[in-house]
Image (cartoon, rainbow, N blue to C red):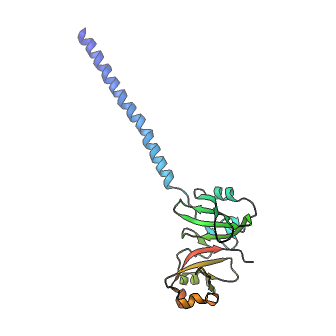
Amino acid sequence: MKQILFYILLIGLISCSTNSQDKKVVDKKPTEESQIETKTVGQTKDYREIVISENSLDTFSIPFPEKNMLMPLKNYYEPYLVEANIGQQEGPDFTYIDILKDDDNPIAYLNFDPDNKFKLDEIRIVSSSAIDQYGVRVGDTYQEVREKRNNDFKNSTNYHQHTYLYTDSSNIYYELISDFTMTEEMLENLDELELTEEQLQKCKVEYIIWRKRK
């Protein structure tokens, strides 16, 4: 009788141990799948390429209608971060909306008129992740811009030593960064300064800028 009771007890212990191990495996599996799913979602964010044209920013006509565009832009550009901020300059403060891939990777700044926070004044593309309708990206050389646009460009430099490449008929122009140093003579005659073809060959696109021609 004692032997029978012993076998019954032994079988019960084995059964409990097996059930406990099964439960651990069952409990663990969903956790691993959840981690894999979370990781996969994070890796497949659709950062659409931002395209600026003479009269549009992707599907948005520019300039925008004079109303608050933050939510339409935020909804359209998800998963990009789209935020409204206040900018400072030598003149009055102004409102701007920035589009960022993350806090360290801004793509574009949409600047609004200081006197009207809903009137779009300028769009500034600051990353090679975006492109203009001519195929120009930040970082392109002057020669690449000439080849892609096939225009006769003008250039000018302001008192902050910012050099711009533009045509009179286009809303899209380029701020350049150069590999040469401005001489004192050049800085003394900024009103009349125009970079030579040789100097322009040493320049690259630092920003793509949209501003409505009057």
Name the quadrant of the C terminus. bottom right
Asked whether, in this view, residue 120 is left or right of residue 32, the answer is right
Residue 29 in view, yes or no = yes
Q: Residue furthest left?
A: 3
**Residue visible at 62% across and 70% down in the picture:** 124
**Residue 78 x, y percent position in the rendering:** 60, 56
Asked whether, in this view, residue 12 is left or right of residue 125, the answer is left
As displayed, is residue 126 above or below residue 7?
below
As displayed, is residue 87 above or below residue 200?
above
Closer to the camera, 152 or 9? 152
**Residue visible at 29% across and 16% down in the picture:** 9
As displayed, is residue 87 above or below residue 190?
above
In the picture, residue 82 is in which quadrant?
Answer: bottom right
Closer to the camera, 175 or 134? 175
**Residue 55 x, y percent position in the rendering:** 70, 71
Name the quadrant of the N terminus. top left
